[in-house]
Amino acid sequence: MINEQQVLELVGALKDPFLHKSLKETGGVLEVSIKEEKEHVSVKIAIAKTNTPEQLSLQMEIVNTLKEAGFKTVGIRFQELPQENIEQFRGTATRAEAQDLLSPLNKVKFISIASGKGGVGKSTVAVNLAVALSRLGKKVGLIDADIYGFSVPDMMGVQTMPIVEENRIIPVERFGVKMISMGFFVENNAPVVWRGPMLGKVLDQFFRDVEWGDLDYLLLDLPPGTGDVALDIHQMLPESNEIVVTTPHPTAAFVAARAGAMAIKTEHTILGVIENMSWFQSDVSGEKEYVFGKGGGPKLADELRTDLLGQIPLGQPDWNEVDFAPSVYAKNHSTGQIYLEIAQRVSDKLEQED
């Protein structure tokens, strides 16, 4: 039977499925323990990202390798490599690896826009926050991940379609935001009646098969609630910063807390809360009218132990035929200014993490 050093060499020759470097190069073989009387070997392995299909493939590869070496049983424990170990390989990534948004080697920051229920203006917030970040000079992408309730192309006033070049989808760009949506692939606003596994494949394509280029931020307009699609996305992402959208109404805030709880359970970061439809300002009296009450946003932020990033009034953008986009506020609009302030807060918080 082979010894511990030989096990180190055998397993160390296998590759981390994300860094595409040998486990010896990454320092990924942490422990080896052999029980000769039982013909059993245990190994502790560190890789760039755990709890993934890639981990399962590597696990089977390790088991097969060690059984071929003469062991009857193999025990494996996985943990994630420290971030500093991953950082040293960023500069060595191939173009394909660096462009894979789900690879730990990609430096894009994910911002997930979530809500507990529909009708609170989550997509409107996602669209305007993306545009505001672009106005701050950031390179921004937007995935309309609300597969059943896609609305981003219409909100952005998009009239063109994505094109395919060399098996890569080129996203549509407007207001400096690159975007992809199920809405581009459905004719005449037809309903989507696919089941979960098929939707998972579409989302994977949105991440891996779209030519996003160099991005600072990728925003995801999540489906409302805590269903399968939202959970799939949380599990796909290496890490994500989540913004929870609510209205001032206590019930909306109560339901939105569930979306925040999902982020916490999936080990993602809650970036803050945005309260939408906070008030309506009358053109006649100039007074603020609190149509949906007060307090929901601050209360939710307090409950989730995060920041209230901003409060958005109830209203609609000014439309014009030349630059038509029914949900995008102009930069000089009072609400557009609020979105710019929120975008700056978001950018500042994310840059502080670096």
Image (cartoon, rainbow, N blue to C red):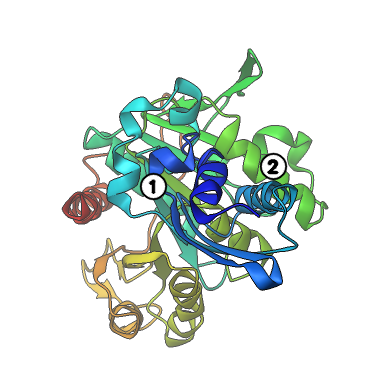
Using the rendered image of the protein, determine whether residue 329 is visible from the camera's viewpoint: no
Classify mark 2: residues with Cα within 10 Å, few (<14), some (14-19) or many (20+).
some
Residue 232 in which image quadrant: bottom right
- x, y percent for residue 207: 56, 39
Going by the image, does 71 lie left or right of 250?
Answer: right
Viewer-closest of 121 and 205: 205
SS class of the residue under badge 1? loop
Q: CA distance from mark 2 to mark 1?
A: 35 Å
Which residue lies under the disc numbered 2? 202
Classify mark 1: residues with Cα within 10 Å, few (<14), some (14-19) or many (20+).
some
Viewer-closest of 270 and 18: 18
Q: Image point 46% across, 38% down: which residue?
A: 19
Using the rendered image of the protein, determine whether residue 207 is visible from the camera's viewpoint: yes
Of label 2 and label 1, which has the lower sequence position? 1
Asked if labels 1 and 2 touch by Cβ distance under 8 angstroms, the answer is no
Viewer-closest of 193 and 312: 193
Q: Residue furthest top?
A: 166
Q: Image point 35% across, 44% down: which residue?
A: 86
Q: Is residue 314 above or below residue 293?
A: above
Going by the image, does 270 lie left or right of 56?
Answer: left
Q: Nearer the viewer, mark 2 or mark 1?
A: 1
- x, y percent for residue 148: 70, 54
Q: Is residue 301 above or below residue 27?
A: below
Which residue lies under the disc numbered 1? 27
- x, y percent for residue 262: 51, 73
SS class of the residue under badge 2? helix
Amino acid type at circle 1 is: Gly
Amino acid type at circle 2 is: Val
Q: Image point 25% across, 54% down: which residue?
A: 346
Please tell me the numbered disc located at residue 223: none
Quadrant of the drawing holding the N terminus: bottom right
Going by the image, does 107 lie left or right of 66?
Answer: left
